[in-house]
Amino acid sequence: MADYFALLEEPRRPWLDPEMLKAKFHARAATVHPDRLHCATEPEKQAANQRYAELNAAYECLRDPKERLHHLLELERGDKVDDVQKISPGTVTLFMEISQLCRETDAFLAEKARVTSPLLKVQLFERGMALTDRLNLLLQHLNGRREGLIVQMRNLNMAWESAPPFGSSTRLHVLPCSRLEHIYRDYSFLKRWTQQLQERFVQLAL
């Protein structure tokens, strides 16, 4: 399993500074970027292309909190992390609220597509604005929940920074991987639900 933290010379930890990560990626990628290897031999170009692809994959993974936590858990446990299926008890009510609003929005969009009367279109416009406001409020709430999880990631950094080195028999026992997995699963659902609401938000604006 590739270690994307090692590729970008970042310490293994749940939270990474986005700007510092970006700067490290650009600094390393610049040395092997295809545009700088015009005079290189074909094997050198192939090796550089491979290196650039690896660095890009590492950056795309580590810049996304969901993918970063997934990768970190797999590195620490040495095993695949199960796909997120079960909603945590703390998000059940939120899931039901999102599902209800999505159903209402989908029904409205289907009705809107069938309407041709100018008068009915005006009435639908007002309903559409009300749905847009509700979507926007829920999106703001989800964003606040995500920010809260990011704070929790930052707070867990100390556990990784003070843990025994990788390969130590006690490392996995002292790392709060169960807590990290809980954050990962909640973040995954929040990201998925945000995408679902944003899609409907855009459709209402058309």
Image (spheres, rainbow, N blue to C red):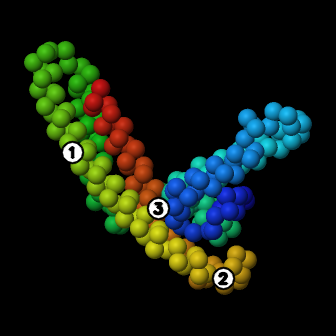
Residue 22, given in percent of the width and then of the height, sits at 57, 52
Determine whether, in the image, residue 202 is placed left or right of residue 132.
right
Determine whether, in the image, residue 47 is placed left or right of residue 11.
right
Q: Amino acid at mark 2?
A: Pro
Residue pointed to by mark 1:
134
Query: Looking at the image, which is closer to me, 93 or 138?
Result: 138
Seen at 33% across and 43% down, the residue is 197
Give the Cα distance between marks 2 and 3: 26 Å
In which quadrant is the C terminus drawn? top left
In which quadrant is the N terminus drawn? bottom right
Residue pointed to by mark 3:
185
Determine whether, in the image, residue 51 is placed left or right of residue 41.
left
Residue pointed to by mark 2:
164
Q: Which mark is residue 22?
A: none
Seen at 29% across and 42% down, the residue is 102
Q: Is residue 176 above or below residue 136?
A: below
Residue 130, given in percent of the width and then of the height, sits at 16, 38
